[in-house]
Amino acid sequence: MFSLPSCPGCAPGRTTLWGDRPLPSRSDLIYDHKMDKSALASLDPSRRASIKRKRSDAVADLIRSHIFQAGLQPNDRLPQESELIEMFGCSRSTIREALKSLEVQGLVQNTTGPGGGARVAPVSINRIVGLLSNYFYFQSISTAQIYQIRRLIEPELAFSVVGHLTLAHFAALDKAIEVQEHHPGGDADWEHHRHAEIDFHDILIEACPNPLLGLMCRFINEAIRHLIGKLGVQEFASSFTCDNIEFHKRLMAAFRSGNAARARRVMLDHVLSAEAVVVPPEDRRMDLPVFHQPLRLD
C-alpha cells in the first residue's frame, strides 16, 4: 500500500517533503483554506485554474517525496490512479496534472493501455542539460566564462577517468581521433569533424565515476557544440585542428599508461590552447552571449 511518512508533531494526514517541513494536508489540497465550495465556484475560470494548479503542484511534491523516501528505482510502479485519488482526496484531473508535471520533470513515465500507469523513470542527462540551458539563456553567459569553468573541471575529468575507461571507451576514443585526422572537404565534413573533437570529450564524460563532475562537463561540452553552429564550422585555422589531435593523442597515452597526474596536466594544456584560439583577447565579439536560443538535445 502506498504510504507517506507522517510529520512529527503535525496533525494526522500532514506529510513532509524534506526533513520536518510540512506539506499541505488533504483538505489543504482540495480548497484554498479561506474559501468554501460556493466561493470557489464564484471565481472566474482563470482564477479557479490557478488554485487547481497549486493543488496539483502540492500533490506532485507529495508523490516525489514518496519516490525519494521509499527509494524507488526506475521502472518501479506507482499506485494506480484510483488509489492516488482516494489517498489525497483530489479529483482525477488534479492527479493527472500532478503526474504530468512529474513526467515533464523526467521523474515519472505515464503509459496507457493494459499494464499501463505511472512508473518511476530515470532522469535523462539531456533533460537536465536542456533545463540548465533554459536558465542560462537569460544570464548572458559568454565564451570566456565557459572557458573559465572548463579550465577548472576538464583537467579533473581527465584525472578521474583513469582506471575507468573500458575497451569500448578506448575504441570509441580512437575512432573519434580517426575522424579528426580525416581532412574535411565541404561544410558538412567540417561540421562532422568539429563535432568529433567534442565527441572525444563526451566519451570521457561517459566513463566519469563522479556524476556531478560528469554533468558539469556535459553542459560545458553542449555549450561548446552550440558555439560551433554560432561561429561557423570553418572559423578556425587548420593548425587548431592539428593541435587538438595532438592533445588527444597525448591524453590517450596518459590514459593507457594509467598516469592520472599526466592526464590532468595534458588536459589543462589542451583547454588553455583551445581558449587562446576561441577567446582571443583582441576579439571582443567572441565575448557575446552564447545561448541565443536554448540547447536542442533531442
Image (spheres, grey):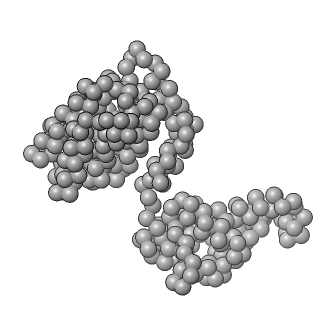
Q: Where is residue 194 in the image (x, y as percent from the top left)?
A: 33, 38
Whether residue 239 sits left or right of residue 167 in the image: it is: right
Judging depth in this view, the residue of 204 and 194 nearest the camera is: 194
Residue 30's place in the image compared with 280, above or below, is below
**Residue placed farthest to the left in the image?**
257
Name which quarter of the figure residue 255 lies in. Answer: top left
Q: Position of residue 42 (x, y in %)?
A: 90, 64
Q: Position of residue 114 (x, y in %)?
A: 54, 85
Name which quarter of the figure residue 266 lies in. Answer: top left
- Is residue 15 in sight in this rendering? yes
- Is residue 2 in sight in this rendering? no
**Residue found at x 85% / y 71%:** 37
Whether residue 257 sits left or right of residue 149 in the image: it is: left
Judging depth in this view, the residue of 285 and 42 nearest the camera is: 285
**Residue found at x 27% / y 48%:** 204
**Residue found at x 54% / y 59%:** 105
- Report the number of discs: 0
**Residue found at x 25% / y 43%:** 179
Judging depth in this view, the residue of 288 and 31 nearest the camera is: 288
Whether residue 199 sits left or right of residue 94 in the image: it is: left
Whether residue 216 sits left or right of residue 128 in the image: it is: left
**Residue placed farthest to the front in the image?**
186
Residue 204's place in the image compared with 4, above or below, is above
Q: Where is residue 190 in the image (x, y as percent from the top left)?
A: 34, 36
